[in-house]
Amino acid sequence: MTTSDESPITRTSSKRMTKGILIVAITIAFGAAILVPFWESMIHNPPIASTLKHEEPPPQESGTQTSIGTIEGKAPNQQAKSSANVSTGAGAGGAATTSPPSGATNATAGPSGKPLTILEGSSVQGSPSFDPATLTVKKGDKITVTNKDTLPHTVTSGTGPTDPNSAKQFDTSIIEPAATADIDTTNINPGQYPFHCTVHPYMTGKLVVQ
Ligand SMILES: [Cu+2]
């Protein structure tokens, strides 16, 4: 029993040994096949912390990043410039717009304000612009201006940009499409106040404060 037992065990062991060696060799081979490229890529693309520093030198990537950054950086500037030009042009049109508007804020509209709507198509000369064209409020009322047009407009006191008193009573400044602006009439004495849009001086209306 012992002898006949030992030899099969020995044979099995040597077979197992062979299998084991094969398994180890295959595992190493597969491991190497997977790990060697990985390590090579690790060498070329080090971990994240150092990747940032190492990827900057290649001209392609840094060039791409720079141009993207430049484009992204320029676009807002140009937008800012153009909108600045719009408001500058609008402001320059009114000779005496240097004094800040007394009672105008660009706060978000509350539902409580007296509504004044800038109608769609207002920028087209001859079209109805402000609704109502004559707005009557009591002193202290808040006026909520809603721009329903697709272009920016203002609600600015005065008969037009060349009115020396332009914007002296109130001025929403630019109201972007779909945006709203509030006019506070707390500091506006009872009376009648023509208003206009500084961007489109033919857009006119009248505010009556009681
Ligand atoms: Cu306008």
Image (tube, rainbow, N blue to C red):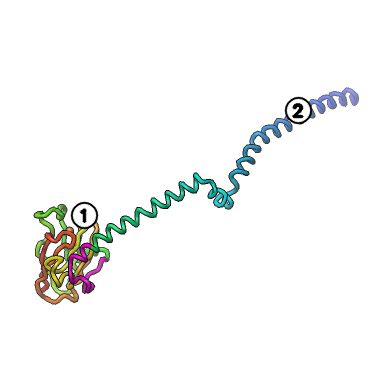
Is residue 150 at least partly visible in the picture?
yes
Q: Position of residue 56 (x, y in %)?
A: 53, 50
SS class, disc 2: helix
Q: Position of residue 179 (x, y in %)?
A: 24, 58
Q: Quadrant of ligand 1?
A: bottom left
Is residue 112 at least partly visible in the picture?
no
Taking the spot 89% from the left edge, 24% from the top edge, the residue there is 1
Q: Position of residue 134 (x, y in %)?
A: 9, 64
Q: Quadrant of the C terminus?
A: bottom left
Q: Position of residue 30 (x, y in %)?
A: 67, 33
Residue 19 marker: 2
- Of residue 199 and residue 173, the one placed in the foreground of this image is 199
Queried on whether the Cβ of the residue with tag 1 lies below 8 angstroms from ligand 1, the answer reads yes
Residue 151 marker: 1
Q: Is residue 135 left or right of residue 154?
A: left
Where is 140 relative to 202, above or below? below
Does the residue at mark 1 contact the one at mark 2 (Cβ under 8 Å)? no
Read off the magenta span.
89-106
Q: Residue furthest front?
A: 59
Residue 30 marker: none
Taking the spot 54% from the left edge, 49% from the top edge, the residue there is 57
What kind of residue is marked 1? Leu
Q: Residues within 10 Å of mark 2 (few under 14, many from 20)?
A: few
